[in-house]
Image: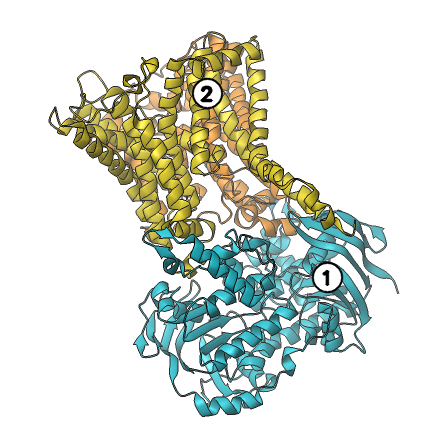
Chain colours: A yellow, B cyan, C orange
Amino acid sequence: MSHPEVSAPARDPWVQRLMEPLLPPLTALLIAAVVGDLLILSFGQSPREVYRLLVDGTWGNAYGFGQVLYKATTLACTGLAVALGIRAGMFNIGAEGQLALGGFAAALVGLGLPAGTPAVLAIPLCVLAAGAGGSLAATVPGALKARYGASEVIVTIMMNFIVAALLNWLVATKVNVAESLHTPEIHAGAVPRLAEVFPAFHGSAANFTILVAIGLAVLVWWFLFRTRAGYELRAVGLQPDAAEYGGVNVGRTWWRTLLLSGALAGLGGINYVLGYKQYYEEGFAAGAGYLGIAVALVGRNHPAGVLVASLLFATLSQGALAVNALVPKQMLDVLTAVVIIAVATAVPEVQRLLRSLRGRQA
Amino acid sequence: MSIALRATGVRKVFGDCVANRNASLEVAAGEIHAVVGENGAGKSTLMRMIAGMYAPDAGRLEVNGRDVTGWSTREAIAAGVGMVHQHFMLIPTLTVAENLVLGQEPRAGMQFDRAGAEAAVRALCDRTGLVVDPARRVADLTVGELQRVEILKVLFRGAKILILDEPTAVLSPPEVTELWKVLRSLVKSGGTVVLITHKLDEVIEVSQRITVMRAGETVGHMETAGATPAAIARMMVGREVKLVGDERTAGRMAQAAGTAEHTALSVRSLTVASSRRPNEVDQLSFDVRAGEILGIAGVEGNGQTELIEAIAGLRPVASGSVRLGDTDITAWTVRQRADAGLSHIPEDRHRRGLVLEYSIADDLILGLQHRFSRGLALVRDRIGRNAEERIAQFDVRPATAATPARALSGGNQQKVVIARELRGREFSVLLAVQPTRGVDVGAIEFIHAQLRAARDAGKAILLVSADLVEVLALADRVGVMYGGKLVVTLPRAEASAQVLGPWMTGAMTGGAHVAS
Amino acid sequence: MSILAFLIQTLRIATPYLFAASGGVLSERAGVIALTLEGWMLTGAFCAALGSFYSGSPWLGVLAGVGGGVLAAALHALATIRYRADQVVLGIAINLMSVGITRFFLRLAFDSSSNSPRVPGFDWAGATEGNTTAGLGSLLASFSNPLVLVALLSLPTVWWILYRTPYGLRLRAVGEKPEAAASVGVSVARVRWLAVLGAGAFAGMGGAYLALEQHQFTDSMTAGRGFIALAAVIFGQWEPKRVALACLLFAAAETFQIRLQGLQLLPSQFVEMIPYVLTIIAVAGIVGRSRQPAALGRVTE
């Protein structure tokens, strides 16, 4: 016992290195699965049957998989937005409003362009507008955080409601199709569906916006871990006082990060507006912003993790439709929340356990 | 002799960190017992377990012969064990009386009996001679008063065994004398006092017996009568050390007088606000010449932190100016100042000096990140080479650049900060604040040698330390800050604890700057 | 339009806000972020409808509503206090969960995806929505719903708890500096558990009021009222008196908008924004200082 360090190298180091990041989320998923079983059983169905349907209806056929990819695209954008904010020490709960405003801005530009504008020009313009729209919604929380230190949690929540009311007013009175809650179809800037290249996806909403999402993930990774601005951003998130000492303008970093975060969320809007319906519709963003928090949490605020987590939540969302014959599709809403709660509670708990195990060894 | 407190074979682990491994303690009833050790030796952890704040992972705790291992704070308080914490455990938004009765509030029916609480506190003040107005809000009290409230709080709960964790850190010398008086009278009336400290002069002055801890373990006990500071220090670090107070700087001073003429840092009529008052630093002026160390002594909280932050660009200046060489930098950003030749060892490395989650390599470029990038991107291989060089120069252990700073000992963390600030870039002026706080004695010697070497190389150093011994050991000139003013500046040869004491306490004021 | 009618309608609109905001003050002053008010209310509303439907008694409905709110709050407390999960994340999750679980059980219990059947509420003969001319009768009618009276008493009760009871002293201490409270033997976890459960009970009662007033549960019927209550807590700077005024102010703005719909003075969407805009202004501290409980959202050992 007096020389415990002798026994330490005996354990395979890479097993340990894999265990530390993977064990906590796996534990959480296990808990969620158990709760899911209980819910299914309460409805008198067999969990095996329900999960089989869920997998068949999502990853089991091209259409279902296409729908998963489509839903994951939006979630990846909002997830990246939340993750970037958290890296800078901020909780951007406004992805919901930023996503909606981004989508609306893209639709406006698409409507403003003359029909027949070449896609190489129209798409980038609409994409830019989406990013700008998202940033715009993040301007108020960003400025108030930087200038007055106002809690971004509260301001972004409040902004969600303000943006929703504003868009509701605009769509109801300014740019709507009669008797509907959506804008007219855009004239230019439509993003092609995946089915145009891979016919198997026929009917699904999956479109090439997914490439944008993947590109954004790579970009965010590079920005966070390979650039000076990313180094400073993470320092601000971990220890704002140390960052300030290191010559970083903390307020400005917060402000810029919220704008970037808003832009990321806003870009998610093109998935629906340019890639799927070709118009902005009231409520298209409902829930995707809040789910972005779950995606960032499960993805541990790492871009690669965010991509994986967005697939997970998209699967649950699409799977709800697949299992509806056996259990109410609302069960999957519950399951989604259970996953979040399980990850939020079990992950720190398992980490503490692992750490105290290691401490006892040392 | 009856034993009031006994700890045997206590072990406590926090996550990765073993705070206590084989700690033991024996305190006799009716004595003042000193527990000494360097910062991080595990003194506070052991005491907190005795006070019921955490449970030990192994070992046994006894109070008056009763096994109390793993008890709660509530049980500890009921048994008459009370702890005065190093960081004040008071709630600023509540009144003195509310703070004192918290947890055992007097009731009138279902309601909290406020008048009763205030009366009880007044009675206690009268009995102990520690006087504070019970109706005042804690946020409005001075540090001395806060300390008094802390002790009252423990006594209010009927403590017979009083544990004080570094009680003098924020007190001025007369307040310290006052505290000793209170402790002695407590012991006379049947109490037992355990005093945690790392200041050896306090130990010798006030205690009857001493327990020494090192690296989480108890390494010795002794009677205070007959113990010498050198012997205690040897036990604290486990080898022979040169006490900083022994350092003589006379030879070096003769040299300084001949060479240093060029003014490197010049502060004029500087006024800086804090959240507490608009003139935390009040119309302050001084110069630091190239090749000298100006040491600023003083009780903490007299504006030192605000002064340094203002010079470093971390806090806005209300009026006055700061010049670096011939350049006015009053309105410059932190980065501009750093690039112009201002280095800074900050007061609190855990808060400012290091990003604890960053690797040693990344922390070695904090504040220099713009010099390690090309375009937008960081240049990883240069960061790696820089880390290897600094780690070797300063013997940082473990010598692996990828280790997170959090995993290093206090001394090694400080070495990372100093390596960066002294060798990471060109500089003409160094702000060194509490450069050896929380650092083991071996590293203190090393850090002091580095500061002297920088001074000898012609750098201007502004040293701020709450440790008068350190200031006297390093400085060529010594100033004292009190109430936001530099109340006196003396050449080293004329400065001593006896001379500076009255200035530090405000007993002498008037801003008479003795010529240097 | 009569002033009396205006006041009555304001009071009715304010009732759920007063309940939920009482919970918000209790929870946030203890250091637990009350993002979950919406979810607790929704759960409370559903349970109240369920209870009232099966028992035929609105009183048992209220009891069930309170029970539902407490249950949802217990889940929140378990995760954030016992397991030290992030309060913001949990708040979002509990809100999502409440929407999902009420829909799930709506289908399970009533086989509907939009609303429950009609359930008994607190009725008084002369009380009909839009009855603006009845004057005194209408005033009496709104007070015949006992929950309106209870709502008026809820924030004063919270004030009394905070400033006049030993528990309130502990609660304020825990919300400001939990480690200091712990050092004198106050159990931070117990104080927070009680505060959160109490908050759930208040919010659940607010939900019960909604369901019983409308005689049914409808999907997502709280429609953001929990967030308006949270806005009132923040705008009222966590002080029960000011929070009560904020609730009444927000409710008055809504009443104004409903009453003036015909006049088209301001699009209704802009009136909806008022609470949120005011809250943002308050949080920014542009007018006056806003100071939240120091330990709000902090996880403690």
Q: What residue type is labelled 2?
A: Leu
Asked whether residue A236 is in view, the answer is: yes
Q: Indicate left or right for B454 with B115 as reference.
A: left
Indicate whether C99 appears above or below B493.
above
User: In the depicted view, which residue is nearer to us: B287 or B68?
Assistant: B287
Q: Which mark is residue B162?
A: 1
Q: Report crowding for label 2: few under 14, some 14 to 19, many 20 or more residues within 10 A (C-alpha).
A: many
Circle 2 marks a residue in which chain?
A: A
Question: Circle 2 — which element?
Answer: helix
Residue occupied by mark 2: A316
Nearer to us: label 2 or label 1: 2
Residue A259 drawn at (x, y percent): 31, 43
Residue B158 drawn at (x, y percent): 73, 57
Image point (35%, 25%), residue name: A286
Residue B372 drawn at (x, y percent): 39, 58
User: In the depicted view, which residue is nearer to us: A48 or C87?
Assistant: A48
Circle 1 marks a residue in which chain?
A: B
